[in-house]
Amino acid sequence: MKHRIGVVPLGEVPALVLKVIAANITAFYRCPAAVLPEQTVPASAFDDRRLQYDAGIIIQALGTWAFADCSKVVGVMSRDIFIPIFNYAYGYAVQGGDLAMVSLFRLNRNADGSMPPPSLFYERAAKIALHELGHLFSLFHCDDPECIMHFSGAIIDLDKIPFYLCPDCERRLIP
Amino acid sequence: MDTKIRIMIVDDEMIVRQSLLTWFEKYGHEVETAASGLEALEKLEQKPFQIMFVDIKMPGMDGLELLEKVKQEYPEILVVIITAYGSIESAVNAMRAGASDYLLKPFKPDQLSLVMERITCHQKITREYQYLKGHLEQITRFDNIIGQSAPMKKLYAVIPEVARSDASILITGETGTGKELVARAIHAKSLRAELPFIAINCGALPDTLMESELFGHKKGAFTGAAHARKGFLEIVSGGTLFLDEIGDISPKMQVDLLRVLEEKQMFRVGSETPVAVDFRLVSATRHHLEDRIQEGGFREDFYYRVNVIKIRLPALRERKDDIGLLAEHFMEKYSHETTKIVDRIRPDAVTLLTSYDWPGNVRELENAIERAVVLSRSRTLTAEDFSFLQPARAAAPGSKTLKAVQKDHILRVLDEQDWQITRSAQILGINRATLYKIIKRDQLKKDR
């Protein structure tokens, strides 16, 4: 099937969160999504000064692996990732490209340091995946806080954005 | 509303440029990168940007030096300084030099979002400013006449006043001062605005052609008149007839027109049937018609018919305050027409334009700007782009004695005033007797 979206665990990732992400993608973008076999995170992606993984290097690695029948792929990892100029990132995608990734590392903590209930953690993971996939579908960051493409730089903001696109982004969506 | 922002990222590290480029692309902004200060300045010459993210530590020209240059040349651009070598001192220096914000890398994604939010807000204020500026421009211009100097403000007040009446108007002024624009503005503000406006340059038409053009002709009136034809006096029916360079029309045509103005009717060439005409006459001349009357070249009765209301247009050198405004207007016009981005004019160019005499007035200024825009290789017009103006006039006083400069000046004023002694003496600030003495002493003579 040409329009299948692959959800790839990068290293060890809880199976349930992968299933939640895949189910949300299927429902949200009306494209079948499937969980694919686990891949090993390349060692070169680890920055030993920052103790984080470079999202750009991981995306490059994702591009070298073959994912049959998938038009787009979302990598999911439990480790902390960064984009060179930023301290951290929840996710990363190349605008209009085929590859994106989600880091679960910072999603399992609330702003006050407490642990969120599992349902909130899954919700956050799904929101990041849907947001990054939006970029793969050429959607830009949206000014409307009532849109999943609204940028969230902190966990408190991520919890505020809804699980849907605003009417403008809905119109722009080109799956 | 378009919220797309034109951004330039200047950093010697490719990874930083790439990261920021990817980030801003997610907002749909138009982004370009430069690996050095020099490359950034080159790009700025080609294209306008609204915001720059500049790394403070770069080989060659560092971020602070680039910031200073940008603020000097392009003060409207917002500059955000980025550095990994942050210290309070460099932050203070950057802000003093005009930076809009300061980021220490690596920074949190929401810090960058906050900076962008502030910039979007600034952009909104800038838009509002441009909107208000547009309104202000409407105040500083009247129809297509541009200027905010005292003589122009007087003119703007006079136009609606005289437009309301139906009296004949004579517009005087040097060549290129915009006499036809004023005539059109008077027509546009008059009760005849919905009816035709016909402009005829009397200086460009020989007498016989002028007669046929104005009065029309009957079929067979002369060789080649195969069909009857209406003249402009009929075609203008109810509108405004603008006769430019009225001082150039022949005495016979003056008599014919005088009759039309007095009797409100005319005869086509070769016809004996009168045709009623109704038009408002606006005339213009660069000459002093009073002198032409004394010389016998212009009929006094016709002069009083066309000169019920007189409007004198100032020469451009009498309203130098408007040169900057006019230069910007023409730059925008020709930038649009040539589809070249030329949107800035450096102060040295404005100084040069203001120091020039502009014998051809606004028309000459417009031609100069058009030429500069067409030949400019960057988006900024500089004094160098107007170097062609210098040989003509600006060098004049350098090597001359005071007496020679005085003689030249008096001669120029006399020429400009068509050797009208009273007016020339007024402009020179001396009395008539003194001017006569100087003319005699220095053996000043009229060119023709």
Image: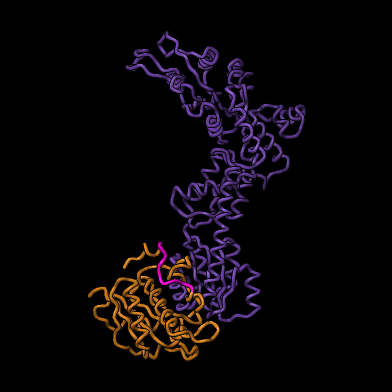
Eyeballing the image, is A122 above or below B265?
below
Position of B347 with respect to A26 (left or right) is right
Which residue occupies the foreground of this view, A67 or B236? Answer: A67
- In purple, which chain? B
Using residue A152 as the reference point, say whether residue B159 is left or right of it: right
Residue nearest the observer in this picture, B377 or B384: B377
Q: Position of residue A19 (x, y in %)?
A: 33, 83
Q: Which residues are magenta?
A: A160-167
A101 sits left or right of B322 in the view: left
Magenta stretch prevailing secondary structure: loop
Say whether residue A39 is visible.
yes
Query: In this picture, is B233 found above or below B68?
Result: above
Q: Residue at x 71, y 27 (%)?
A: B422
Location of residue B260 with respect to B74 vertically, above or below? above
Give chain A's shade: orange
* Residue B371 position within the rendered picture, expressed as x and y whole percent measured from the top left: 49, 47
Q: Residue B203: horizontal and vertical position, in percent? A: 50, 26
Give x and y (percent) for residue A132: 39, 75
- Is residue B344 located in the magenta-colored stretch of the structure? no
* Quadrant holding the N terminus of chain A: bottom left
Question: Can residue B360 be seen here?
Answer: no
- Say above or below: B212 vs A86: above
Describe the colour scheme in one phrase.
by chain
State which quarter of the image contains the C terminus of chain A: bottom left
- Residue at the extreme top: B272
